[in-house]
């Protein structure tokens, strides 16, 4: 089966396009003009939809994944975003179109149907009816090949039914294979950089309808894993499959993953290179679907972070943003990068990633399993395992979000689509008054030393700390800069308006990224500075000095 990519023409002048040409199969010929239809609410006087930036996917409208068929380089919401930022003082809002096809490197697909006709795809809009999407245009092409491998095999005409695998039946709770997660790593140092993306290897996770690997159907699971691994080598030079994992899930609810994982075949460690660092991602970790777009966002973010700044990275996941800043912005002089994440599964990925950080990086880096929302007295007993030191526990109880902000010049937030937790948002709104009244706790993070290495890695409970060899007194500062990475446009607008209305922050810059071409969403990287209240006081004090002289 051939692997190919679609190429994209240069984007419009208002955007920056990185959909680079490659050896591709030419797109089908455009339909006659009279067959073209305008998108909803389109201006009749506007030009015809750009077929060179059209989705051209046979599954469009039947699949719930994509909602925009034409002009992938300009999501429908882009004009609204441009107007919004212009209204709030950002006239130079830019937009990066990124790769338009074959961009999705991570996907979760439902497995339904029957043993004679298995369906592997997404739910139809508003239903739990699975739509087969073997020719999905947004998937990295090797994902489609791996899905086909599950169903038929690459060279041999075999089917899941010949292995006696039954897709999951939601109504009855029967069957073996419920979902499959495909994740592509495009980082292979044995290949030239230009060839790494198209030769990405696929990590396959089989979500099995049983409690553990000791269930009666384990032989079927192993047979399917061995089949995928064996026939995932279309040539001697290229092995399509990176690894095969199993996840065990028996819940009748619409929950994809269970808590039990098992590595079956292939490489255990999954690496990607983004933001200037090698990143380890477990199959249970959150990973960006659009690897290249995320890398572009990180490169843009790094330009606005001063060298040597202390950073608090909230909603940090495996700490990719914080660690990339520690490395690329050379956080030295005993400064710190604090990564805070609620999902404890991300801890192992952080530890492996940090092992590849250069020894020359001399700063205190810590990762904490904690929630950014306030911990009530009732919940305190249940959350102790997420906190390492007593000062964090006590202070977390009183003012949870504030405890993570002390000593940081910059706070980076990458919240889920619903936006920031109300308690964190309120804390950021109240920072000027809190800075006057509150006293920062003494931090024990820099108390210990290790003479053998520039830093040491220590794990306690659900926290990881990397020590700096340079001692530093605790900072009395709260962040002057807020960097907001938005996954949901509507929630970002609400959070942005709330921050601006508090007068504590002003919107300084914003950049958009096309993380999900074919949809109506965009990813926003926004920069806020401490508001006019601070600057006006500085001006006032300056005038007094002039008068006195």
Image (cartoon, rainbow, N blue to C red):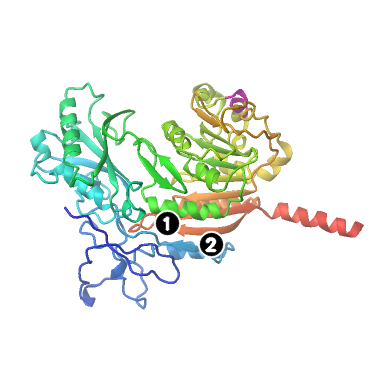
Q: Is residue 124 visible?
A: no
Query: In this view of the protein, which residue sits in the foreground, 469 or 383?
Result: 469
Left or right: 159 in relation to 190? left
392 is within the stretch colored magenta:
yes
* Residue 415 coordinates in the image, percent (x, y): 48, 44
Query: In this view of the protein, which residue sits in the foreground, 528 or 471?
Result: 471
The answer to whether residue 239 is above or below residue 462 is below
Question: Which quarter of the rendered picture does the C terminus lie within?
Answer: bottom right
The answer to whether residue 36 is above or below residue 348 is below
Looking at the image, which residue sits at the far right? 549
Mark 1: secondary structure: loop
What's the magenta bit mostly, secondary-structure-wise? helix
* Residue 259 coordinates in the image, percent (x, y): 34, 28
Q: Residues within 10 Å of mark 2 (few under 14, many from 20)?
A: many
Q: Which residue is mark 1?
A: 522
Query: In this view of the protein, which residue sits in the foreground, 516 or 363?
Result: 363
The answer to whether residue 399 is above or below residue 17 is above
Mark 2: secondary structure: helix
Give how far apart the Cα atoms at labels 1 and 2 are: 14 Å
* Residue 98 coordinates in the image, percent (x, y): 39, 59
126 is within the stretch colored magenta:
no
Quarter of image, res 245: top left
Q: Residues within 10 Å of mark 1 (few under 14, many from 20)?
A: many
Q: Is residue 409 visible?
A: yes
Residue 85: numbered disc = 2
* Residue 461 coordinates in the image, percent (x, y): 49, 23
- Residue range in magenta is 389-395
């Amino acid at each position: 089966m051939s692997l190919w990519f679609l190429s994209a023409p240069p984007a419009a002048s208002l955007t920056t396009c990185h959909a680079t040409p490659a050896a591709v199969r030419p797109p089908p010929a455009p339909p006659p003009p009279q067959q073209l239809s305008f998108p909803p609410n389109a201006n009749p006087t506007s030009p015809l939809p750009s077929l060179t930036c059209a989705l051209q996917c046979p599954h469009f409208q039947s699949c719930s994944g994509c909602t925009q068929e034409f002009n992938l380089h300009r999501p429908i919401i882009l004009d609204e975003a441009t107007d919004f930022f212009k209204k709030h003082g950002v006239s130079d809002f830019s937009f990066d179109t990124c790769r338009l096809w074959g961009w999705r490197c991570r996907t979760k697909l439902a497995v339904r149907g029957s043993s004679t006709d298995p369906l592997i795809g997404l739910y139809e809009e508003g239903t739990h009816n699975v739509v087969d999407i073997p020719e999905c245009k947004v998937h990295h092409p090797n994902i489609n090949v791996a899905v086909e491998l599950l169903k038929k095999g690459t060279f041999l005409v075999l089917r899941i039914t010949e292995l006696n695998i039954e897709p999951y039946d939601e109504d009855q709770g029967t069957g073996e294979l419920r979902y499959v997660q495909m994740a592509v790593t495009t980082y292979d140092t044995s290949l030239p950089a230009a060839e790494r993306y198209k030769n990405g290897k696929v990590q396959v996770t089989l979500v099995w309808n049983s409690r553990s690997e000791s269930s009666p159907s384990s032989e079927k699971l192993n047979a399917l894993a061995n089949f995928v691994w064996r026939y995932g080598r279309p040539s001697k030079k290229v092995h399509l499959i990176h690894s095969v994992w199993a996840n065990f899930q028996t819940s009748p609810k619409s929950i994809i993953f269970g808590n039990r994982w098992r590595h079956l075949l292939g490489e255990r460690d999954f690496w990607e290179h983004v933001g200037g660092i090698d990143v380890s991602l477990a199959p249970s970790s959150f990973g960006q679907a659009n690897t290249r777009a995320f890398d572009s966002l990180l490169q843009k973010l790094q330009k606005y972070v001063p060298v040597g700044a202390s950073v608090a990275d909230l909603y940090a996941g495996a700490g990719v943003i914080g660690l990339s800043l520690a490395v690329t912005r050379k956080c030295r002089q005993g400064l710190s990068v604090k990564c805070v994440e609620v999902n404890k599964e991300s801890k192992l990925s952080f530890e492996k990633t940090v092992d590849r950080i250069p020894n020359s990086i001399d700063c205190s880096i810590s990762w904490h399993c904690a929630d950014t929302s306030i911990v009530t007295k009732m919940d305190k007993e249940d959350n102790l395992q997420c906190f390492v030191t007593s000062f964090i526990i006590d202070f977390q109880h009183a003012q949870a979000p504030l405890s993570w902000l002390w000593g940081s010049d910059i706070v980076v937030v990458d919240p889920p689509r619903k936006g920031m937790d109300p308690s964190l948002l309120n804390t950021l709104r109240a920072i000027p008054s809190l800075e006057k009244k509150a006293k920062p706790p003494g931090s024990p993070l820099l108390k210990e030393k290790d003479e053998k290495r520039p830093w040491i890695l220590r794990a306690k409970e659900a926290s990881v700390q990397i020590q700096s060899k340079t001692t530093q007194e605790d900072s009395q500062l709260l962040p002057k800069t807020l960097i907001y990475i938005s996954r949901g446009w509507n929630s970002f607008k609400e959070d942005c308006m709330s921050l601006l209305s508090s007068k504590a922050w002003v919107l300084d810059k914003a950049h958009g990224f096309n993380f999900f071409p074919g949809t109506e969403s965009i990813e926003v990287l926004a920069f806020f500075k401490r508001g006019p209240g601070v600057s006006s006081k500085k001006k006032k004090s300056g005038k007094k000095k002039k008068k006195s002289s």
